[in-house]
Image: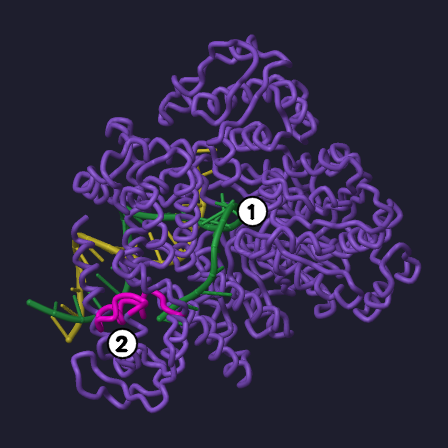
Chain colours: A purple, B green, C yellow
DNA sequence: ATGTGCCACTTGTAGACAGCATGTC
DNA sequence: CTACAAGTGGCACAT
């Protein structure tokens, strides 16, 4: 089908596509159009990565907009949201506007209401539904990208429930679900009342195979000689082989450490193939990486990058990840070794994909467990860059003939698994049942169960008993913790007065039969004020219960550490595990600072729960270190994490403490201010004394400390302080001017001002124009600080 | 005494969404 | 129930 034959698109769209070089639709795209994609029909497209899924989405959304509607594109990751936004921005040329809504992108509801297409993460959409964003009812088309992620234990239920809610809000809504090829795309299509486009078609040839010995055997029977020389690894031989004909490669491994080690080794493969221009550009890139964060991980990455190789995993900061991805797409980096993050993330195709590890450590399996077929296929699907490579190759590595055979059977020939709803898992239901009641989607137990009937879970499970009984458990939990009330049936069910401590959750449920007996269509379920707040804040009710209980149990003003440990032990904080030996270390810290912790500690004899408690203390201590201005490098070293992990923890803590502040207000806690202060300290990474200073634009933790030491302790001091001192402390003239201006100084100009030491006397003339780290007060301060933190390391 | 190379043993293991109100060094 | 690479510590040996 030619693009000229398309109808129902905004004027200009077709010529736009032609300018992009799109003439002919790919077969799956044509199939989608035949199935009514441009006419508002529901559709499930289960097709391989890079086979033009986005075009199917675009055609559906654009035609919906042309009919006067509004479209929503749901993505699983924030990084994908920005990627899609950038892609859709091109439609601006024919008057179709795009907006983004994710947790960290600013966007008011009114502003989004003016956009034709909105890109958002599933959690953000869920949150918008909970908060009743008015424009949601204007939606006529919703696209759900990577819909197979419904299978994900932690985040799948959100997508599932959100789709169900959007459909209930607007029964006319067109749903377009894009999925990887999965076992049961037909079931998903049934659930969504959609027609199915299920295709294996790819725009460029993908050959999959197994490398064993000196040969690469493909699924089509062909063989390619790839000899392994000397003591080199198989992946090194494969990377060199394809690099010599001008192709880049992606190597998937199963741990961060392996990714880093492999990148180091592969550097010696890519390095000899670099041109002088490559080297210059790579040196610049390495410098950018070093500047982003001064940690060992960054230095290691930069060292690799200089040699044309890189590693990629969640320990990298977002900046570093994008730098690496962009340089790889620009063919500057020749090889990336990555953990599975990359397979799910933004588009980074390579001519050859090497899946080195096909097993991963999984404590629940008691050791190494094989990866899902779907996961391996997702990685292999990254092979082949449309328009750049003649073909893509995806290779698994085998060390024996038997293993080679096993890999063919298990992955090359195998069909991917089915997608199974994970909605009946209690943690997921806890959140979504509360949200469903709070936002008025259901007002009775029966109504709630009716709503849940519209989910994929219900359509997949033969007996509804399980969902019903878990729902009752969850309702009872929500009622006991004062998030939900029943009204109208049994007069004396005083909820709240007998609310059980959060710690007992999960064990002491009132019997489900008891609940069912009380149920009656007339019994109203209603969220309490607290319940509404929890739902609006997007907290797991169990997190909220923990926080509320912790705040209520505090007799004295909670310390920062106490609050940090409190939020760190909620299910919304990603766990930081205790390493061997650390249980002792943090056990000691616990006895030292026991009095600061909020709520009741589990007994030491309940081993698992006590360990969780200590793990939360570890995370809390990390946050305290950060809020005591400990160097990034010291923290990443001490807790053996990457810069990205540190930022992630800080970010989550900031969010949870923000939520805790709202909860504190809601329950009239006297510690609201303490929570706010702890949050501000973690946000800026500073001690109490600097909170005023960091509120000035351009002043962060480092500059604030230097100013403070020079006697400038609050914003007002910036307006009156000696300019020479300010310049001496801040180094850069431009920086100093900007900061003085932000502080509201009348005449911020630094013209003709010389740096002056705080004690008096003219400072070194070398400071002018020097933007580097340098020494002087700065160096001294950070050294002392470093030593301080080192000595406090011994404290626990 | 101190340095070096080898082997056996121990250790640790992927991922990152959300509120609210504005902006790092 | 399963693996495996990197790091660690002990040991024999040479200097």
Left or right: A628 in relation to A361: left
Identify the residue at image location x=77%, y=45%. Answer: A140
* Residue in front for this viewpoint, A71 or A175: A71
Q: Is residue A521 something one can see in this rendering?
A: yes
Give the residue pinned by disc 1. Answer: A403
Image quadrant holding the N terminus of chain A, namely: bottom right
**Residue A292 image-quadrant placement:** bottom left
The correct choice, above or below, for A369 with respect to A741 in the image is: above
Disc number at residue A448?
Answer: none
> Residue A776: x and y, percent?
22, 79
Left or right: A791 in relation to A530: left
Pointer 2 indicates a residue of which chain? A
| Cα separation between marks 2 and 1 | 72 Å
Q: Mark 2 Cα within 10 Å, few/some/many (few <14, many 20+)? A: some
The magenta stretch is A698-716
Give the residue pinned by disc 2. Answer: A721
> Residue A42: x and y, percent?
80, 41
**Residue A577 image-quadrant placement:** top left
Identify the residue at image location x=31%, y=72%. Answer: A718
The correct choice, above or below, for A549 with respect to A733 in the image is: above
Find the residue positioned furthest to the front. A746
**Residue A425 image-quadrant placement:** top right
> Residue A556: x and y, percent?
23, 37
Are marks 2 and 1 in one subunit? Answer: yes
Mark 2, secondary structure of its residue: loop
Pointer 1 indicates a residue of which chain? A
């Amino acid at each position: 089908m030619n693009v000229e034959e398309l109808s129902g698109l905004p004027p200009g769209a077709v010529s736009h596509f032609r300018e992009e070089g799109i003439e002919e639709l790919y077969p799956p795209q044509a199939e989608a159009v035949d199935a009514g994609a441009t006419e508002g029909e529901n559709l499930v497209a289960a097709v391989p990565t890079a086979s033009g899924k986005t075009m199917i989405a675009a055609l559906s959304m654009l035609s919906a907009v042309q009919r006067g509607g509004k479209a929503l594109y749901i993505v699983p990751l924030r990084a994908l949201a920005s990627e899609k936004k950038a892609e859709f921005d091109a439609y601006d040329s024919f008057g179709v506007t795009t907006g983004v809504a994710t947790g960290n992108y600013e966007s008011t509801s009114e502003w989004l209401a003016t956009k034709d297409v909105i890109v958002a993460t599933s959690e953000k959409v869920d949150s918008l539904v909970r908060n009743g964003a008015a424009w949601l009812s204007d939606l006529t088309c919703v696209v759900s990208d990577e819909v197979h992620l419904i299978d994900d234990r932690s985040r799948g239920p959100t997508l599932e429930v959100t789709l169900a809610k959007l459909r209930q809000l607007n029964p006319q809504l067109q749903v377009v679900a894009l999925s990887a090829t999965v076992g049961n795309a037909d079931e998903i299509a049934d659930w969504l009342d959609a027609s199915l486009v299920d295709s294996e078609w790819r725009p460029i040839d993908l050959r999959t195979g197994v490398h064993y010995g000196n040969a690469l055997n493909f699924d089509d029977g062909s063989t390619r000689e790839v000899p392994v020389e000397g003591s080199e690894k198989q992946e090194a031989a494969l990377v060199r082989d394809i690099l010599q004909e001008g192709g880049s490669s992606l190597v998937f491994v199963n741990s961060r450490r392996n990714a880093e080690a492999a990148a180091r080794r592969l550097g010696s493969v890519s390095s000899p193939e670099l041109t002088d221009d490559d080297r210059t550009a790579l040196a610049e890139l390495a410098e950018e990486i070093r500047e982003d964060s001064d940690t060992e991980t960054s230095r290691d990455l930069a060292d690799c990058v200089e040699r044309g190789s890189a590693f990629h995993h969640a320990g990298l900061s977002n900046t570093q990840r994008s730098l690496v991805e962009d340089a790889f797409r620009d063919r500057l980096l020749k090889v990336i070794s990555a953990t599975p993050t990359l397979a799910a993330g933004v588009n980074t195709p390579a001519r050859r994909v090497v899946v080195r590890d096909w097993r991963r450590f999984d404590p629940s399996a008691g050791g190494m467990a094989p990866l899902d077929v779907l996961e391996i296929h997702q990685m292999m699907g990254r092979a082949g860059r449309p328009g750049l490579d003649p073909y893509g190759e995806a290779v698994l590595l085998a060390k024996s003939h038997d293993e080679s055979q096993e890999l063919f059977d298990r992955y090359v020939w195998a069909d991917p698994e089915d997608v199974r709803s994970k909605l009946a898992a209690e943690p997921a239901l806890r959140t979504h049942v509360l949200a469903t009641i709070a936002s008025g989607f259901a007002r009775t137990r029966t109504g709630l169960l009716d709503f849940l009937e519209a989910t994929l879970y219900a359509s997949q499970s033969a007996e509804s008993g399980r969902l019903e009984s878990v729902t009752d458990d969850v309702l009872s939990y929500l009622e006991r913790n004062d998030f939900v009330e029943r009204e109208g049936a049994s007069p004396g069910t005083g909820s709240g007065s007998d609310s059980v401590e959060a710690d007992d959750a999960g064990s002491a449920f009132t019997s489900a039969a008891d609940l069912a007996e009380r149920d009656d269509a007339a019994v109203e379920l209603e969220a309490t004020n607290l319940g509404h707040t929890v739902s609006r804040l997007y907290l797991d009710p169990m997190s909220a219960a923990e926080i509320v209980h912790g705040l209520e149990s505090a007799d004295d003003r909670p310390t920062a550490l106490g609050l940090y440990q409190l939020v760190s032990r909620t299910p919304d904080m990603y766990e930081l595990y205790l390493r061997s030996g650390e249980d002792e270390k943090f056990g000691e810290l616990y006895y030292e600072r026991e009095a600061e912790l909020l709520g009741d500690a589990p007994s030491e004899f309940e081993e698992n729960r006590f360990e969780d408690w200590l793990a939360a203390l570890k995370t809390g201590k990390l946050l305290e270190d950060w809020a005591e201005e400990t160097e990034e490098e010291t923290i990443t070293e001490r807790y053996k994490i990457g810069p990205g992990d540190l930022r992630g923890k800080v970010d989550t803590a900031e969010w949870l403490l923000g939520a805790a502040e709202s909860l504190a207000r809601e329950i009239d806690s006297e510690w609201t201010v303490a929570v706010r202060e702890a949050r501000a300290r973690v946000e800026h990474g500073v001690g109490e004394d600097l909170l005023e200073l960091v509120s000035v634009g351009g002043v962060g933790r480092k500059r604030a400390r230097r100013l403070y030491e020079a006697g400038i302790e609050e914003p007002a001091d910036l307006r009156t302080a000696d300019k020479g001192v300010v310049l001496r402390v801040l180094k850069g003239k431009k920086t100093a001017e900007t900061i003085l201006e932000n502080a509201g100084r009348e005449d911020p100009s630094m013209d003709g001002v010389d740096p002056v030491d705080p004690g008096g006397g003219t400072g070194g003339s070398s400071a002018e124009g020097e933007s580097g780290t340098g020494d002087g007060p700065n160096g001294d301060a950070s050294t002392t600080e470093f030593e301080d933190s080192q000595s406090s390391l011994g404290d626990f």
